[in-house]
Image (tube, helix red, strand yellow):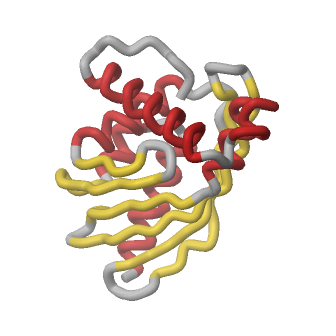
Amino acid sequence: MQDNKLIIERFYTAFQQKDFADMNACYSDDIVFSDPVFMLLKGDQVKCMWEMLCKNAKGFSLTFSDIALLDEEYATCKWQASYIFSKTGRKVVNNVKAYMKLKDGKIVEHSDAFRLSTWISQALGWKGALFGWTGFMKRAVQNNARKTLLKYMEGEFENEGI
């Protein structure tokens, strides 16, 4: 079980350094990831998401804490990322609880939980504060994130605000 803690520490230490290659080395090839913005991603989608986010991060810092090994497979931790949202130039501080399943020395499932309406409010300012709780606004953010990731994967990426 202690090995699982080391894998999680390696993942978030690499994230602090925006080292997406080392982050992705902690994942299995068939990794399944979910969060409120990108929703469900699998395999290369996950790895490309981290590459895109790390390569384009501005004013980025990250801390992580409270790694808890729940059993031989499951673990949780907390992490906080601060960065400038490129589309608006606004600072975002995202407090996240991560849930992970580990197997054979790799992360096989990773789910990040945070309040999407809070993220939208920080990223988009008064429009986000006013409408960030609505399903319409949440879906718009999710669709934009998905579209941006697909463009990145196709090599047509222009930093569109993720």
Question: Which one is nearer the viewer's eye here, 46 or 14?
Answer: 46
Q: Which residue is nearer to you in this view: 126 or 20? A: 126
Q: Is residue 34 above or below residue 73?
A: above
Relative to 58, residue 156 above or below: above
Q: Where does residue 124 sit, x and y in percent of width and height?
A: 71, 30
Q: Residue at 51%, 53% (x, y): give it.
A: 12
The number of discs equals 0
Taking the image as shown, residue 83 lies to the left or right of residue 38, namely right
Report the residue at 40% width, 54% height from top: 34
x, y percent for residue 18: 50, 36
Q: Which of 35/73 is in front?
A: 35
Q: Is residue 1 left or right of residue 35?
A: left
* Spot occupied by residue 148 in the image (x, y as percentages of width and height): 41, 24
Relative vertical location of residue 54 with respect to residue 42 in this rendering, above or below? above
* x then y, percent, for residue 80: 66, 53
Residue for point 28% across, 39% down: 45
Say which quadrant the N terminus sits in: bottom left
Can you name the residue that lies furthest to the bottom here?
A: 71
Q: Residue furthest right?
A: 126
Which residue does the image show at 64% across and 56% down from the upper left? 115
